[in-house]
Amino acid sequence: MSKVESFLSTADEKAVVEAIGIAEKETSGEIRVHIEQSSSKVPFDRALEVFQELKMSETQLQNGVLIYLAIQTKSFVICGDKGINDVVEADFWDKTKDIMQAHFKNGDFKQGLIDGILRAGEQLKKYFPWQENDINELSNEISKG
């Protein structure tokens, strides 16, 4: 089993996916988590690449959020699309990252991801509330590379 496959237990992965569902319940926004072993690229550049690969830039209101983790290099990035980035406070993603990192330092990756997801969901709900015709545009499953 690869490190990516064993990074989260099955129960932890299920809890993270459930958190995505909860966070997206009252918003048109989309949240994805991507975990991979490593990348030779700068983490932010790789996260932007994954953002495109997962078609997150194709959401109607440009309100996708990606949480990208590279296990081997112990790096992670939160990428928001233009729609959400234009409305959240300038330091919102940095503060969210700090909250997540506090959990990660203690080895609690599940809770770090859940807290980051729910925090992003609060902002998405505030600025992009669910509308009658909204559909879940992207999978809630964790993608792995």
Image (tube, rainbow, N blue to C red):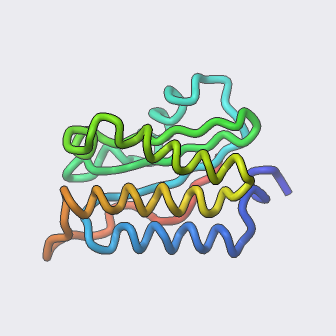
**Would you identify the image quadrant in which residue 9 lies?**
bottom right
The x and y percentages for residue 24 are: 35, 68
Q: Identify the residue at image location x=19%, y=66%.
A: 129
Would you say 31 lies left or right of 77 here? left
Q: Between residue 7 and residue 93, name the one nearer to us.
A: 93
- Count all numbered tags in the image, as a single digit: 0
Q: Residue furthest left?
A: 132
The x and y percentages for residue 122 are: 32, 62
Would you say 139 lies left or right of 121 here? right
The x and y percentages for residue 108 are: 69, 58
Query: In this picture, is 93 found above or below 130?
Result: above
**Would you identify the image quadrant in which residue 91 lies?**
top left
Q: Quadrant of the N terminus?
A: bottom right
Q: Between residue 129 and residue 53, name the one nearer to us.
A: 129
Q: Identify the residue at image location x=53%, y=65%.
A: 141
Q: Residue furthest right?
A: 1
Query: In this picture, is 37 found above or below 42?
Result: below
Query: In this picture, is 58 found above or below 7?
Result: above
Q: Identify the residue at image location x=50%, y=26%.
A: 45
Would you say 18 lies left or right of 130 here? right
Q: Identify the residue at image location x=51%, y=74%.
A: 18
The x and y percentages for residue 113 are: 56, 57
